[in-house]
Amino acid sequence: MTSSASLSARLRSGETIRSAWSTISDPLLLENISALGFDAVTMDMQHGSHTESSICQGIGTVKAAGKPVIVRIPVGRFDTASRALDFGANAVIAPMINSAEEARAFAASMKYPPVGERSWGPLRSEISYGQPGSNDYLLAANQETLSFAMIETRAAFEALDAILAVRGIDGVFVGPADFSIAWSNGREANPFSEAIVEPLTQIAKKAAASNKLAGIYAPNSAFAKRYQALGFSFVTLASDRGYLAAGASAMLNAWDEV
């Protein structure tokens, strides 16, 4: 599914964006994922094998398919956030944002002055660095490029109001596996845990009340629909490894049933 409206405009209008999750940096695999029916593609530098090089090249591949790109950067690598935007990313997810101070540092790397401290230097041809029309990108970038602070710990949950209040933070994004570890005091890594449903509901409600966006990683389609019902409008579904496994299992099971 493609749309002429920007990712920012679609999310702010209340549309649910269903994103693929890319962990394997192989360009041909990314090209195939981009051709699937997802609304967007998220490329993972934190736990996936993506590097600055694969992000730079991969963003062009995804955009050629007419879809927006989200990049999850490594923990604390806010310089990489600016680089991802220069490469043409539409949004960046920053993991382990546990305080308003960390949220401000992330926002500073994402937004041009006077909101933040992002340095001018966009790379992709459509941004036209130093060319006529480049000012259009400058004037629109703070609204159009989205910053998602990940809420994964008890500290982040307790600081949620302060994080949401940071100028330049457009939304929050939940990693349910890490959140379940924190919520269970290290007893389990279980994104399916019923114990985290209530705090997840609070996160989505507080984001909406602050006029901010709420995103979440969904391990499967059933949980994606459940999270959508809770108020999460940006939902990433499983991962490329999962798509390969699910497709192969379905084919093999169908073979066995013959």
Image (tube, rainbow, N blue to C red):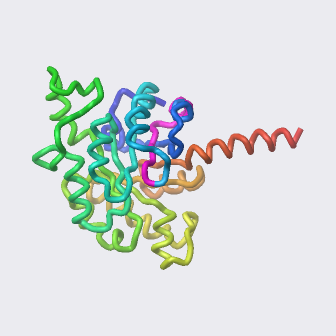
Q: Residue at 46% of width from left, 36% of height from top?
A: 39
Q: Residue at 39% of width from left, 35% of height from top?
A: 68
Instruction: Say left or right for 191 vs 163.
Output: right
The C terminus sits in image quarter: top right
x%, y% of residue 48? 49, 49
Q: Is residue 253 above or below residue 185?
A: above
Instruction: Say left or right for 10 vs 227.
Output: left
* Magenta residues, start to end: 32-46
- In the image, is residue 42 part of the stretch drawn in magenta? yes
- In the image, is residue 22 part of the stretch drawn in magenta? no
x%, y% of residue 242? 62, 47
Q: How many marks?
A: 0
Q: Is residue 233 above or below residue 144?
A: below
x%, y% of residue 41? 46, 39
Q: Residue at 50% of width from left, 71% of height from top?
A: 181
Q: Residue at 40% of width from left, 42% of height from top?
A: 15
